[in-house]
Amino acid sequence: CSDPNCIACSGPFKCTDCKGIFSVLNWSTCVETCQEGKVSVNGVCVDCEAGCKRCSSTDINECLECKLPLILYKGDCVENCPERWVQLNSNPTVCTECGPHCLTCCRTDKNKCIVCENPFLIDTDKTCVIDCKDGYTPVSGKCAPCEVDNCKSCDANVKTCEECKAPFLLLAD
């Protein structure tokens, strides 16, 4: 064997086993650490899945870190995060799950929703709610403020009050 850290060879340049912490790379040399995109499995550097920078030594199909511009999603490298997941500005290398009932959330905060699952609505704090709070009404999937003072509930045009906040009373036309 030509490599001093190699303990078994098949030919002068084909290493099949290395000393201690070393791993066989490309069946030729012994290395202390496998190069990017490879992992040591039973003392041999093997390829991770395509696009993977670092993978698990117990499951080479489970990626732990992706090569840019790919993003880590549940052990796989993807180009875009799926629905209900977001590539946060604060952690752009992994897909992070959005808040409850949220289909699309903001890149600055996973709990700030842009689109909620049906029948949920986007509340004023950008969370998904089943009903709007008093003084608001559902308009295009969001809770919009009623435009009538002291209104508890209004119709979808926000200008017609249907029920007033106590102690106020609704005037009939």
Image: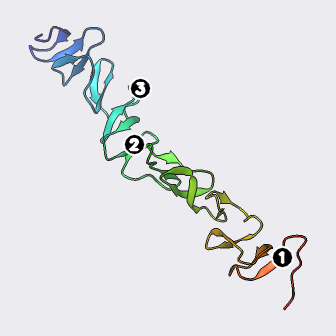
Left or right of 150: which side holds 156?
A: left
- The alpha-carbon separation of the residues under discs 2 and 3 comes to 22 Å
Front residue of 89/6: it is 89
Tags 3 and 1 touching, CB below 8 Å = no
Name above or below for residue 161 compared with residue 70.
below
Mark 2 crowdedness (10 Å alpha carbons): few <14, some 14-19, many ≥20: some
Q: Which residue is mark 3?
A: 58
Q: Which residue is mark 1?
A: 163
- The alpha-carbon separation of the residues under discs 3 and 1 comes to 62 Å
Expressed as whole percent of the image width and height from the top left, the position of residue 56 reads 39, 29
> In the orientation shown, which residue stands out farthest toward the front?
149
Secondary structure at badge 1 equals strand
Three-letter code, disc 1:
Glu
Left or right of 61: which side holds 118?
A: right
Front residue of 115/41: it is 115
Left or right of 52: which side holds 171?
A: right
Secondary structure at badge 2 equals loop
Name above or below for residue 62 compared with residue 80.
above
Three-letter code, disc 3:
Thr
The earlier-in-sequence mark between 3 and 1 is 3
Point out the image quarter for the N terminus.
top left
Residue 94's image quarter?
A: top left
| Residue depicted at 77% across the width and 75% down the height | 149
Say which of marks 2 and 3 sits in front: 2
Residue 4's image quarter?
A: top left
Q: Which residue is mark 2?
A: 93
Secondary structure at badge 3 equals loop
